[in-house]
Each structure stands twice: as C-alpha cells, then as structure tokens.
Image (spheres, rainbow, N blue to C red):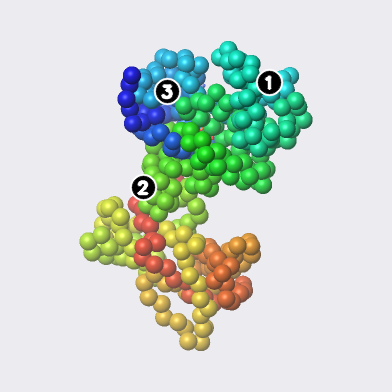
C-alpha cells in the first residue's frame, strides 16, 4: 500500500521531440477530487503533458506518480484512467450502449452489472433514452456527453479531458461546461482539463496551470491567476487588459509612480517586482476596472494620478455591459461599463474622464528583446 495525499504528482517532468524541449521542468501536485486545468496557447505542451499522464508518451526526465505509485513505464491500460478527446471518439458501428459498455466488457464485467452501470451513467449525463441509437443519430453535444459517460463508467481514479468542448458551438459549449461542473461536483473524480479557453478554465477549475512554450508560468486558483498574475504573459492571456507605455517616476517602498509620454500619471504597487526610476515599463488596467464620467470641456477638468482625460471613440452594446473605446492621447483604452452602472449613455466624440484604483494597476518590465 502506498499512501499519498496526492492523486497525481509530476516531479521535474521533461519531454523533448528531437532537440525541441516541449515540456520543461513541470512540477505539479493534484489533490484527490481536484479539477485542474492546463491553460495556454496552441503548441505550449498541454496535450503532450496529458499524454504523459495517460501513458501514451514517456517523459524523458522526471517522475510521474498516480495515487503515490510511480507510473513511468506503466502501460496506459494499467493506469485506471478515463479519457475524453477533442474529436468525438465513439465507435460508429456500435450502439451507444455498446460504446459505453466497451471498457467494462474489456474488464470482463458480468452482463447484468454492465447493464446496470451503463444505465446509471447514461442517467448521469442526462441521456437515458439513447442506448439503442448509433453515434451518427446523435448531435455533436450529445456525442461528447456519451464520450464522457464512456470515460466515467469504469469509475476511473483520474479523468483526463483534452479540449472536449472545442468542437461544439457556443451554446452547446456552455451547456456541456455546466454539465461537466455538475458532474465534477457530484462524482468528485480527480480531473485534468486541457483548454486554451480562459473562461472555461476559470469556470471549471479549482486550480489552473498556465503554460507558455512548455514552461509553467503560474499555478493558482482562478482568483489568484486573475488578480495576482505572476507574469505579463499570465495577465494578458487571461481576460482583456489595456496596456500603457510608461516610465517609472518614483519608487517609495513597494509603491510605484508612473507616467506616460503624454503626462497621464499612474500609481500602483510593484507587487514584489523590482524596477528603477527612469525605467520604461508596461502598465496594465483591465477594462472593467476603469470608471468613466463625462467631462465638461469648458471647465477643462484637472485630473490627478490614476485619472486621464479622453474622448469616446466607439461604443458597443453587449447586453450585460457596454464597451467604450476611449482615445487617451495617442492610445485607445477600452472601458467596460456594467449595464447596472450605465446611468448615462456615452456617445462618440464626447469628452470624458477615466479613473481607476491603484490596486488595479499592474506593472511589468518592458520586453526589450521584442522586435
Ligand atoms: N509527435 C511529435 N513530434 C514532434 N513534435 C511534436 C509531437 N507532438 C507535439 N509536438 C510539438 O510539441 C509542441 C507541443 O504540442 P502539444 O500538442 O502538446 O500542444 P498543445 O498545447 O496541446 O496545443 P493545442 O492547443 O494546439 O492542442 C508543439 O510545438 C508540437 O508541434
Ligand atoms: Mg492539444
């Protein structure tokens, strides 16, 4: 018996294809019942990592443990996994019942028990009536639900999902996303969910692993990732943000004062990063953190730090909020106004004052290597 409080452990995992390191120094511990997302742009190594956990690929370096047992070299079918892929992977010549029953048949489960467990799992994915149909007689979303049922029926210790929603249209995606969250809460199976959709990751996971070019950029709760990004990459990959090119004017402890070339002044916190006075850096403020008020042109409103004057360029009504594009000097700043706070309508050409809190300013060193 091995005792481990973690269901999955990746210790210094590395994978190369030729001389190309596609997963580098990957460390992660997943607790029982957790849902962890791997989030990152195309080609960052999400599927490669999942395939190593699944046993389809072997790591070149490092240890992989499932329930405390070292899995390096252990064949996939001995790892007690359920898997769902991006493309529908049902057998077209088998009925839905036979598709779902497949894994149990391989395990030589008794017929009566197979019937009972397939029925139960079809209820769980809310498709109790489709056992006699063939995959082509189901919609895309229904097929993906069957793929999930098939992965769950063997009661795996670990569920691996590789972009299972990305082939579906927006509405179905949302429905199935809700369903996955419900399933995850009801069944409590430890889950790794691969996605390049940040909203899906925020919605579904207990923790998110943000990857870029095979490297772990940050591991944290959705709240941490959004509000305490470890890097510029994490901040800009998750959610929209406005970037301003600024210079460091002053440093007082962790407080930092910044200014754009056009005299917009920002104050924020260095959040543990080190900067020096005179350094050109990037400052970010998210659209939903900026407040907008109309300005009186004749009075030429004077603005302080964390305020800026601008002119509305465009407004787009999006139901739950309105997005305003505001010209601030030579920059365009996006401001998101929730419907509940939209006491007045802003129109193109209108002079406005933007303001935000110092807590909502994120500062990162400028990447000089960029062309
Ligand atoms: N069998 C292989 N041989 C050589 N290179 C590979 C192989 N499989 C993947 N790669 C490369 O490894 C990198 C990571 O690929 P991977 O499939 O893990 O990306 P991903 O994050 O899943 O991307 P996507 O979001 O597009 O699915 C890519 O640069 C890819 O080209
Ligand atoms: Mg992939």
Residue at 73% from the left image edge and 35% from the top image edge? 139
Q: Which mark is on residue 16?
A: 3
Circle 2 sits in a helix, a strand or a loop, which is it?
Answer: loop
Circle 3 sits in a helix, a strand or a loop, which is it?
Answer: strand
Q: Quadrant of residue 94?
A: top right
**Nearer to us in this view, 263 or 136:** 136
Circle 1 sits in a helix, a strand or a loop, which is it?
Answer: helix
Q: Quadrant of residue 137?
A: top right
Q: Quadrant of residue 142?
A: top right
In the shown orientation, is residue 208 left or right of residue 162?
A: left
Residue at 47% from the left image edge and 42% from the top image edge? 205
Disc on the earlier residue, 3 or 2: 3
Task: Select label 1 or label 3 by which is in front.
Answer: 1
Q: Are marks 1 and 2 in contact (CB under 8 Å)?
A: no
- Whole-percent x and y of residue 228? 37, 52
Against 261, residue 228 (above or below) is above
The residue indicated by pointer 2 is 230
Residue at 39% from the left image edge and 29% from the top image edge? 7
For label 1, the crowd category at 10 Å Cα-Cα, with few meaning under 14, some 14 to 19 and many 20 or more, is many
- Whole-percent x and y of residue 328? 49, 68
Residue at 52% from the left image edge and 39% from the top image edge? 186
């Amino acid at each position: 018996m091995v005792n481990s409080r973690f269901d999955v452990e990746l210790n210094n995992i590395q994978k190369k294809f030729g001389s190309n390191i596609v997963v580098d120094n990957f460390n992660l511990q997943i607790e029982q019942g957790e849902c962890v997302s791997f989030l990152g742009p195309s080609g960052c190594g999400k599927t490669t990592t999942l395939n190593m956990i699944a046993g389809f690929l072997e790591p070149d370096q490092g240890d992989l443990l499932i329930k405390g047992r070292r899995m390096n070299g252990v064949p996939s079918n001995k790892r007690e996994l359920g898997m769902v892929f991006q493309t529908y992977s049902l057998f077209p010549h088998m009925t839905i019942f036979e598709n779902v029953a497949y894994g149990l048949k391989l395990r030589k489960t008794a017929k009566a028990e197979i019937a009972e467990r397939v029925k139960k799992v079809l209820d769980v994915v809310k498709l109790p009536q489709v056992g006699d149909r063939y995959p082509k007689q189901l919609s895309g979303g229904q097929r993906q639900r069957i793929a999930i049922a098939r992965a769950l029926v063997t009661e795996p210790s670990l569920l691996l999902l590789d972009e299972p929603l990305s082939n579906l249209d927006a509405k179905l995606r949302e429905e199935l996303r809700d369903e996955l969250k419900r399933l995850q809460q009801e069944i409590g199976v430890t889950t790794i969910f691969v996605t390049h959709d940040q909203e899906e990751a925020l919605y579904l996971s207990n923790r998110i692993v943000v990857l870029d070019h095979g490297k772990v950029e940050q591991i944290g709760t959705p709240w941490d990732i959004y509000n305490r990004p470890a890097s510029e990459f994490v901040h800009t990959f998750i959610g929209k943000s406005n970037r301003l090119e600024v210079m460091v004017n002053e440093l007082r402890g962790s407080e930092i004062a910044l200014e754009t070339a056009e005299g917009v002044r920002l104050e924020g916190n260095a959040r543990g990063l080190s900067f020096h006075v005179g350094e050109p850096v990037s400052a970010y403020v998210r659209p939903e953190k900026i407040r907008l008020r109309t300005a009186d042109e004749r009075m030429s409103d004077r603005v302080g730090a964390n305020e800026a004057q601008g002119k509305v360029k465009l407004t787009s009504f999006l139901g739950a909020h309105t997005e305003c594009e505001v010209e601030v000097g030579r920059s365009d700043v996006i401001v998101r106004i929730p419907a509940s706070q939209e006491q007045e309508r802003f129109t193109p050409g209108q002079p406005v004052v933007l303001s935000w809190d110092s807590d909502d300013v994120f500062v990162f060193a400028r990447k000089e290597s960029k062309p």
